[in-house]
Amino acid sequence: MSNDKSKTTAAAAASQQDDEPDDWDKRIFSTGCADENAKLTDCYYEKKDWRLCKAEMEKFRACWKAQGNDVRTAMKDA
């Protein structure tokens, strides 16, 4: 029985770790555009084609510029 308890404890610990933001999440949140990024990522996940996510990309791009991230990352419009 102690083996089952250790599995439950390990699963709970893993679940708790998943709730903590990792370095990637922290970087996305620091841009101020986490919601726009999530919507863009969800769109791509659903449609499997970036060309079908132009509206989401434009919203993300507008947020990115409004937050000053283009200056911060030395990004240039193509």
Image (cartoon, rainbow, N blue to C red):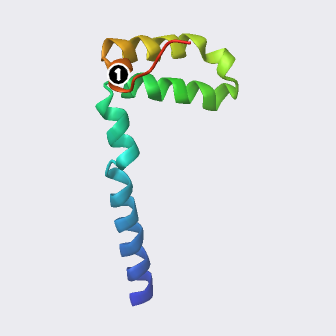
Quadrant of the rendered image containing residue 11: bottom left
Residue shown at the point (68%, 25%) measured from the top left: 47
The percent coordinates of residue 62 (x first, y second) are: 41, 10
Quadrant of the rendered image containing residue 29: top left
The percent coordinates of residue 17 (x first, y second) are: 35, 59
Residue shown at the point (65%, 22%) measured from the top left: 50
The percent coordinates of residue 71 (x first, y second) are: 34, 19
Quadrant of the rendered image containing residue 32: top left
Above or below: residue 25 compared with residue 45: below
Residues 67 and 42: in front is: 67
Question: Is residue 47 found left or right of 74 in the rendered image?
Answer: right
Residues 75 and 6: in front is: 75
Residues 39 and 8: in front is: 39
The percent coordinates of residue 5 (x first, y second) are: 38, 81
Question: Is residue 77 found left or right of 52 in the rendered image?
Answer: left
For label 1, the residue is 69
Residue 1 appears in the figure? no
Location of the C terminus by quadrant is top right
Residue shown at the point (35%, 67%) measured from the top left: 13
> What amino acid is found at the position of numbered circle 1 in the picture?
Asn
Residue shown at the point (44%, 82%) measured from the top left: 4
Residue 7 appears in the figure? yes
How many badges with numbers are in the image? 1
Location of the N terminus by quadrant is bottom left
Question: Is residue 14 found left or right of 44 in the rendered image?
Answer: left
Above or below: residue 22 compared with residue 59: below
Above or below: residue 12 compared with residue 62: below
Q: Is mark 1 on a helix, strand or loop?
A: helix
